[in-house]
Image: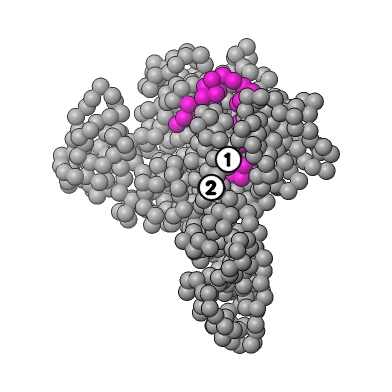
Amino acid sequence: MDLTGIYHRPESEYAFITGKDTMSIRLRTVKDDIESVELVAGDPYAIRSLNSKWFNRKIPMKKGLSTDLYDYWTVSITEPKHRLAYGFFITDQKGQQVLYNDQGFQFNYDENYLAQENNYFRMPFFQQIDMFNAPEWVKNTVWYQIFPERFANGDPTINPKGTKEWDSTIHPGRQDFYGGDLQGVIDHLDHLVDLGVNGIYFNPIFKAPSNHKYDTEDYFEIDPHFGNKELFKKLVSEAHKRNIKVMLDAVFNHIGDQSPQWQDVLQHGKDSQYADWFHINGFPVHYTPTDNFEFAADANYETFDYTPHMPKLNTTNKEVQDYLLSIATYWIKEFDIDAWRLDVANEIDHHFWREFHDATTALKPDFYILGEIWHTAQPWLQGDQFTGVMNYAYIEAIKEHFIEHVTTATEMKNNLNRQLMLYNDAADRMMFNVLDSHDTARIKTLAHDDMDLVKQIFGFTFIQPGTPSIYYGTEYGMTGENDPDDRKPMVWNEKLQDHDFYAFMQKLIKVRKQIVKYLDVQQLNWSEIDDELGFMKLNYGNLEARFNTGVAEINSPIENAEILIENGYQDEILNPKGFAIYIKK
């Protein structure tokens, strides 16, 4: 028995409350080293007060997901007294058994030892306020990301100076404007209804000099080239009438250099009332301009990246905290938004995000808080800060197999399972799964214009835990390399639209809404993988899916099942880049 690989941590992704009377428990062991795990658990006070011998009862744990290194065992348990002491009886392949509890590994113990409640791991009380809040509506949402300046020009009278002609075939420059605005979004809300999405994620809409608006000048004003507050209020209302949720982008790590706060610092230096709002290393503030507008290596103040026009805010300053929280709550109270996406969220202190969480969820208990974090995000997903994060690491593992072919199906499975086990089940359902966005090359471009491959990777992504997102224009087959090429004007010219792919996405979204009830991490099972063929089969109970990422046809009969959606599956043959999602009868 390899004890070094056995791991559990109380009150974490290994032990979390799931209801008033219930909690889920996980245990990690070395892959294929352990034959069985049994949970011993009960009310800790019952041993002493009621002379209970619950420690003699053993509850089998299920071997769930596995990686190349570890197996993960899971069990859900009900305890009416809302408090739990627990440990693990672990038996290896040779029949050796050990008790694993809060005191470590025990090979020799008697009933007196088992009767000591303080020898066990503990969940002292099932505190509902500490339970991870996963709004039900998020799980059922398919998002649509809109980069406002490039979606639709609904009111040419408010175009910025120098606005270019709308053309979805060009390669935009970083400083270009094309006149997209909020009226353009309102004009095309029925397009979103027709597609089937029920959530809009907006890139920033607040007053800012750039086309991307991540250099905020005024958080309390809509950018005048997008419209005004009355128009935005109408947009939210019209979206809600269509059962579409609205998420705004909060840029709180930094502010634009045209903001009145930073301009005051430039004017008054260390005597500015806002001098402590920023991380300034000397006065006067300065930097050396370069040929790249967004880069300066020698700024004597902290910035986002090396962008001198985005000075970093000091969120440990109480005035800054109050200012940002007033913004966060204003757009909920006045405009009824449903979610915030938090830009560069990992570069802001946890203390502030806890304040942010409490302020927003006090107004809307089912408010969705999405952090932009590209790496492991456990510290932010404990229930007191974010609801989910942009799930880039998870999606990159999918791309590495389906598109780049640098990993086998087994290696991808291991990477995905490892990601799922970083978080509790509820958090896994709240993750934001993006195949392309304003920060990445478009998926069709990454797939070298192979639409069968694009369909396959979308099919795979839509059966993953988490909430999927579609970047504007992807439904019509738009292309683009990395920023700024991924921000072309939306393709409204019907002659340039991929109508076959649009119909596919309509159907896939309908299927996603039909199957979301099955997508439980505890039910996920990779029932078959053949790396030589590039074949994989995975299921959540009766929901099953097959994918061929190899180069040869695969004879793969599907018996007694209802096929919900397929591409490249016919006459019991699964073609390369083909897939099928179905319900077994």
**Horizontal side, residue 456 vs residue 247: left or right:** right
Identify the image quadrant of the C terminus: top right
The foreground one among 264 and 584 is 584
**Horizontal side, residue 352 vs residue 436: left or right:** left
User: For the residues marked 2 and 1, what is the alpha-carbon distance in whole angstroms?
Assistant: 8 Å
Do the numbered discs 2 and 1 sit on residues whose CB atoms are within 8 Å? yes
In terms of secondary structure, where does tag 1 sit?
Answer: helix
The residue positioned 45% from the left and 48% from the top of the image is: 376
The residue positioned 39% from the left and 47% from the top of the image is: 346
Badge 1 amino acid: Thr
Looking at the rendering, the stretch of residues picked out in magenta corresponds to: 437-466
Q: Which residue is mark 2?
A: 68
The residue positioned 84% from the left and 39% from the top of the image is: 560
Could one spot residue 61 in this view of the protein?
A: yes
- So how many labels did they put on this image? 2
Could you say where residue 365 lies in the image, as x and y percent from the top left?
Answer: 57, 55
The residue positioned 75% from the left and 32% from the top of the image is: 556
In terms of secondary structure, where does tag 2 sit?
Answer: loop
Looking at the picture, does residue 272 appear above or below residue 471? below
Q: Residues within 10 Å of mark 2 (few under 14, many from 20)?
A: some
Q: Residues within 10 Å of mark 1 (few under 14, many from 20)?
A: many
Could one spot residue 7 in this view of the protein?
A: no
Give the mark nearest the N terminus, 2 or 1. Answer: 2
Tell me, yes or no, whether the highlighted magenta stretch contains residue 507: no
Which quadrant of the structure image shows residue 75?
bottom right
Could you say where residue 516 lies in the image, as x and y percent from the top left?
Answer: 68, 44
The foreground one among 6 and 299 is 6
Residue sitting farthest toward the front: 94
Q: Which residue is mark 1?
A: 410
Badge 2 amino acid: Asp
The circle drawn on residue 340 is none
